[in-house]
Amino acid sequence: MTRFNLTLISIVFLTMGCKDDDTSEATLTSKIDKIMEEETDFSGVIHIGTLESVLYSKGFGYADRENQIENDNSIVFDIGSVTKPFTALGIIKCQELGLLDFEDTLGKFFPEVPDDKKDITIEQLLTHSSGFVDAIGDDYDEISKEMYLTQSFDTQLLFSPGVRYEYSNVGFSILGIIIEAVSNKSYEEFLNEQIFLSSEMKTAGYLMPDYSKVVIANGYDDLGLLGVPMANLGKPNEQPWDIDGPYWNLKANGGLLMSANDIGQYYKFIKSDLIDEVSKQKMYNKYLREDNTSTLYRGLGGS
């Protein structure tokens, strides 16, 4: 599966309000600047803040190398698989609105789902424990919602649902389709209404923001993954998309566009009373062990 987002890097660190005197804004700035003086290959944004203030925000490298447009916290990036926590939050908002429950199964939403998949729960999709494969095609393959579901349901599960963890983009695209089914809105419309507007994320989305007023970063294949090192792959929203955003191989599992400023606003949103305490607990729970490591999968929608 070709993941275009590998070529776009936006790094955002958000502190938890550490009280240590050694993390003063001046000290933090000095330490990061010193590290970045020796780091010549990084291209993106470092954005650090608390609920009260931004402590550090600086761009490095170029969003558009040909036109020498430098990165800063207003540049819009393809955030890649960090889209998944937004899909998870969309599901949480659906639950808060009474549109679904985490224990609901695929059989409730899709009468055509085969027997081996009908009992997969929303929670299993959220925690990568459904058994679905990682992907069924490349990000920009043209595919309808109906065909995406048909092909996904026709795949063989990797394991019985709930048995273990296995990263799955397919699971999150199916969650996006469920959001559309229960809300009667497009995936982007629902996230915009329930998350982006409430959190003042001004450039977050696929198509709805006015991107004519901002710079969207180009992708660059610095690693030569596609055979042409340093190739300019263009802007993510200039790739083959459907009329309402990416096709379903990418939609809801990746490809959302937003700036570092937007991510800062998202952090404030998930800490606010706009999400109820029960939902927050689900977001931060430990669920199951990842692969054969000692790491426990924490939260919902890990990217």
Image: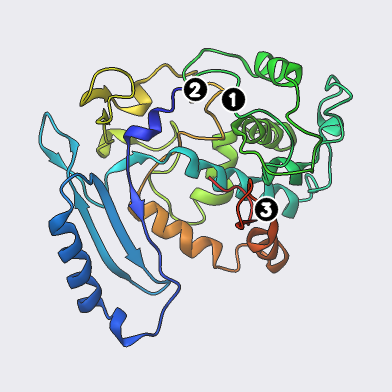
Q: Give above or below for 118 relative to 299.
A: above
Q: Please tell me which residue is depicted at 68% across the width and 51% down the height of the picture.
A: 92
Q: How far apart are marks 2 and 1 (CA)?
A: 7 Å
Please state which amino acid type lies under the numbered disc 3.
Arg
Tell me which residue sits at (34%, 21%) in the image. 238
Q: Residue 261 carries which label?
A: none
Are circles 3 and 1 on residues that touch, CB within 8 Å? no
Q: Closer to the observer: label 3 or label 1?
A: 3
Residue pointed to by mark 3? 289
SS category of the residue bearing label 3 = strand
Closer to the camera: disc 3 or disc 2?
A: 3
CB of mark 2 within 8 Å of CB of mark 1? yes
Q: Position of residue 22 (x, y in %)?
A: 29, 83
Residue closest to the eye, 272 or 30: 30
Give me the C-alpha separation between circle 3 and circle 2: 25 Å
101 left or right of 51 in image: right
Q: Residue at x 63, y 48 (%)?
A: 292
Q: CA separation, marks 3 and 1?
A: 21 Å
Q: Which residue is rendered at x = 32% and y = 33% of the image?
A: 7
* Secondary structure beneath label 2: loop
Which of the two labelled residues, at mark 3 and mark 2, occupies the earlier sequence position? 2
Q: What element carries label 1?
A: loop
Residue 135: assigned label: 1
The amino acid beneath tag 1 is: Ala
Relative to 13, is 303 above or below? above
Q: Earlier in the sequence, mark 3 or mark 1?
A: 1
Q: Amino acid under label 2?
A: Met
Question: What's the colour scheme?
Answer: rainbow
In the rendered image of this protein, does residue 247 appear above or below residue 97? Answer: above
- Bin the neighbour count of mark 2 within 10 Å (Cα to Cα): few under 14, some 14-19, many 20 and up: few
Q: Which of marks 2 and 1 is nearer the N terminus?
A: 2
Question: Label 2: which residue?
Answer: 1
